[in-house]
Amino acid sequence: MSNDRTAIGIAAAVNSGNVTSTSVLEEHLARIAERENEVHAFNLVTSTQARERALEIDAQIAKGENVGPLAGVPIALKDNMCTRGVPTTCSSKILEGWKPPYNATVVDRLYAAGAVFVGKTNLDEFAMGSSTENSAFGPTRNPLDTSRVPGGSSGGSAAAVAAGFAAVSLGSDTGGSIRQPAALCGVVGVKPTYGLVSRYGLVAFASSLDQIGPFATTVADAALLTEIIAGHDPMDSTSIPQKAPSLLSVLDRGVEGLRIGRVTDLPEGADADVLEKLDAAFLALEKVGATIVDVTLPSLSFALTAYYLIAPAEASSNLARYDGVRYGARVAENDINTMYANTRAKGFGDEVKRRIMLGTYALSAGYYDAYYGKALKVRRLISNDFADAYTKVDVILTPTSPTVAFPFGSKTDNPLAMYLCDIFTIPTNLAGHPAMSVPFGTGQANMPVGVQVMAPTLGEEVMFRVAASLERAS
Amino acid sequence: MSDRLSAAVVAKVARLARLNISEAEVERYTKQLDGMLDHFADIDGLNLADVEPMTQAFPLANVFRADVEQPCLDREEVLAMAPAAEQGRFRVPPSGGSDE
Amino acid sequence: MIDNGLPEGWELVVGLEVHVELATKTKLFSGSPNRFGDEPNTNIDPVTLGLPGALPVLNQHAVELAMRIGLALNCTVQPSTFHRKNYFYPDLPKAYQITQYDQPLNIDGFLLLRGGVRVGIERAHMEEDTGKSTHFGGTGGRIHGSDYSLIDFNRAGVPLVEIVSRPDVRTSEQARQYVNELRGILVAIGASDAKMEEGSMRCDANVSVRKYGDPLGTRCEIKNVNSVRSIGRAIDYEARRQIDLLETGGSIRQETRHWDETDGRTHTLRTKEDADDYRYFLEPDLVPLAPDAEWVERVRAALPVLPAARRTKLAELTGADVDGEAVAVVVERSQDEYVQTVASLGGDAGRALVWVQQAFAEEGEQPRLPASDLAALTILERDGKITATQAKTVLIDMLDSGGGDPAAIAAAKGFEALDTSVIEKFVDDGIAAQPDAWAKYCGGEEKALGSLVGTIMKLSKGKADGKVVTAILQERRGI
């Protein structure tokens, strides 16, 4: 029992009294103590609060109460989710030390399910990046090879699960920021349908694209987490008015009769080792009864452009509130405009500044139609392409990331090179569809490769079915 | 090369976004942003005349809350996180005149 | 050509923008209380403060009130969206205001002023209010030259409706009427308490001038107009300022100007080098607002009778001028129903209107004096049993006591209307007592009438009806 490090296994063991929440926690804290200096998955390890919570849970269990489906499960949270009284920095100097006076909805839901929070994980500053090299507090290292990046922007959350610091973790995904690090760290990562999981308390990057989702070592754990955090939230106007889907129950259904889409006009850029594993995935699914169907998504090659106009535009507005007036860092000056300009110049890193400027430009008078306005139309084209494809197939498979985890510094010279990490993940954010990455073999330098399963809006059931099959075959 | 974006425009955008960047940074960002816009020109060739912009990922409308009071934040907890506070209010340096 | 108080040939063109705070219990996008006068920063929540991670959710009652406003102004209610208006200012917590831009909730309405002047309403849209800045140090607390500001976010997020008129107003008097009429409507429909002195109704004026027949001139927006009276003064000043400038060969710069109540002038607000580009884009955290036809109809059907309709009804009932002071005042005080009740009890509606206007300023919507008592009083007058002057005395008595039998009170005071022949005798005595005044009056000096009437009234110990005395004197004069 104590060897089962999955969330499902831990919760069952804790709820049945076979193991204490405290002992599970201590195991995880020990692993953190051993390797965190090397990996730097966390901005903050909340061991004191975690221990208190574990004791509370143990007391409840001792009284014969059932604590919940995540009883005693150590969970890490990306440091862009508000946790009351616990610093939430978004890995930015401008929010260093800021303690929110409220919890994100997902935090409340996990807490109610019995989870034990072990810490806030590192990210690319304000979730802008694909390698976690943009963190103001130093990068996170890939636990499988510390000379390589864990991916981003949720690099810390991915690494925490890969290194066994937490059984599961939460990240956020705007252009691939859960799926890509999941692929690079060899874990499962899920971006749910837009609107399925509440964004209340998630520090906004790009409001029409952001979604919270889980990292886990198994598809089943990811399904459980999704069930717990999903479902309507009245505090989020974009929240879909539905209950959370039932996903654990579909995992064993297999893929017999399902149509799996292969994109024949996939944008170039994926390495050969990655494409090899994708081919293997198609074969594996065929073997267990799925049919492979060719589809085209002609507008996909324009997705990067649309994304890098829409996301920075929304971000430029979402990040304007960091002005030194009500919270966060301030550079004191004699007039307010100088205060704004110096506070933000000092508090924001390079990539954040760049995207704010790109976004401000794309929205500005005279340029709106040429940039932001056009990008919204390209978004429509992409959505139409998917709608068309999903009349022929149930899910679509692509690589998650064009490469395996790359060495530090190899893409930081040219911002555009870094943006290309997201070519396969971006389209689903634009369309609002769910997608997840499942580890499927290894590529270069023995680093893990992830296969991306995409499904139509609210297609989590079929997506998880296919993912479970892939997991069994991998 | 820099025919899409001039340093003057970048400087203006930085002012609009309240980012005090140095001249060297203006130059660097101009080059980088110009390069990006060059890449993004791939959408210029698309025929988008009859395409409706997509502004919502999931079609919802008429989402409301009832006009019922909810508990407020504790003022002290909030002001404790403020860079400068006085008399129960947030303190800031003077403006050079507003437009609102 | 209407009398706009300007030099000949000049036309005044005014458009008015009125911001109204809605009378909801909570804010537009969150559940903090919408209350005036509380301790600073006590009505706050993550959304109000623009904390990281906060999200707006639309207050349904605010939508209801916004629709009431639109329908009361004869607007079309249409599907609408919200946009972000991006700019930096310390009382704007998110550094953007959520407002409505190219698809506002209410469009294409109108408001009728007295005398049939029709002012078009372009739109009435929803948006959130900002916090409040108080400036300290520098020159007497004004913005320029101050040392620091303190910000209170209690007001941030309060629901507003911005009502934008078309530039149909042509005189400062019309502007004042527009604002008064609008205020009356807002209060009648329960949308707002519309108190300019508390800031729950704020008015900006867009003013331009032109020679009749010319195209529209450049306009200036006048802000900081805090009372109805100031609206008139500010518009008059600004119109003159613009005319003076144009007549001396200058040109009007399109700008926002600040009205200073103490020196009675408008001043340029210091302009920044780059005027703000608001970079409007659709608010991604909200979804479209499209009230269905049933909801719109319910709101329309539930609208109370509006002041204009009430004035028409009262005028018809009493025979008074629909655009006159009496009707306006009585409707404004919501005492028109009382007058109707008096009439329905057999009282004289015209007399009742006069008394209510003159004596009921402190009475409120439900006057203390029972309508039946006032009805009885007006009947005495109508039947010639007592004079108007006597009736007033009786009325004051009745008001003091909260009621009474006017006939009995009149009798107790020894009031009775005098017979005409008796009055003729008092007139004889009056003329005899003031032969010079009589001579002057016969010679055409109308002013002499006053002292003659006064003498006669005194002689009759106030019992003669002044109107009858005057009529007799006029008849005897024979001019």
Image (spheres, rainbow, N blue to C red):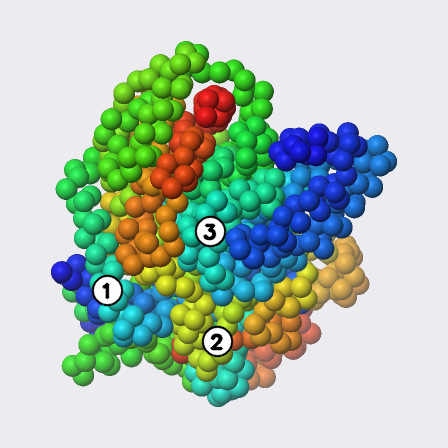
Q: Are marks 3 and 1 in contact (CB under 8 Å)?
A: no
Task: Give me the C-alpha separation between circle 2 and circle 3.
Answer: 36 Å
Label 2 resides on the chain identified as A
Asked if residue C278 lies left or right of residue C9, the reply is: right
Q: Position of residue C197 (x, y in %)?
A: 55, 68
Disc 1 is placed on an element classified as helix
Whether the residues at callouts 2 and 1 have beta carbons within 8 Å, the answer is no
Label 3, label 1: how many angstroms apart (C-alpha)?
A: 34 Å
Q: Which residue is mark 1?
A: B30
Task: Report crowding for label 1: few under 14, some 14 to 19, many 20 or more residues within 10 A (C-alpha).
Answer: many
Q: Quadrant of residue C213?
A: bottom left
Position in image of residue B52 (x %, y %): 27, 36
Whether residue A12 is visible, yes or no, is yes
From the viewer's side, name the closer residue of A262 and A306.
A262
- Residue shown at 81% from the left, 39% from the top: A60
Q: Nearer the viewer, mark 3 or mark 1?
A: 3
Residue that appears at 39% across and 45% down: A405
Q: Is residue C85 left or right of residue A296?
A: right
Q: Which residue matches tag 2?
A: A331
Name the spot of residue B36 as percent of width and height, x first. 24, 54
Task: Pick the quarter of the image with the C terminus of chain C.
Answer: bottom left
Q: Earlier in the sequence, mark 2 or mark 3?
A: 3
Dot 1 amino acid type: Thr
**Label drawn at residue A146:** 3
Q: Is residue A259 left or right of residue C180?
A: left
Please state which amino acid type lies under the numbered disc 3: Thr
Which residue corresponds to the image point at 71% horizontal and 41% vertical from the top-left?
A: A24
Pointers 2 and 3 within a single chain: yes
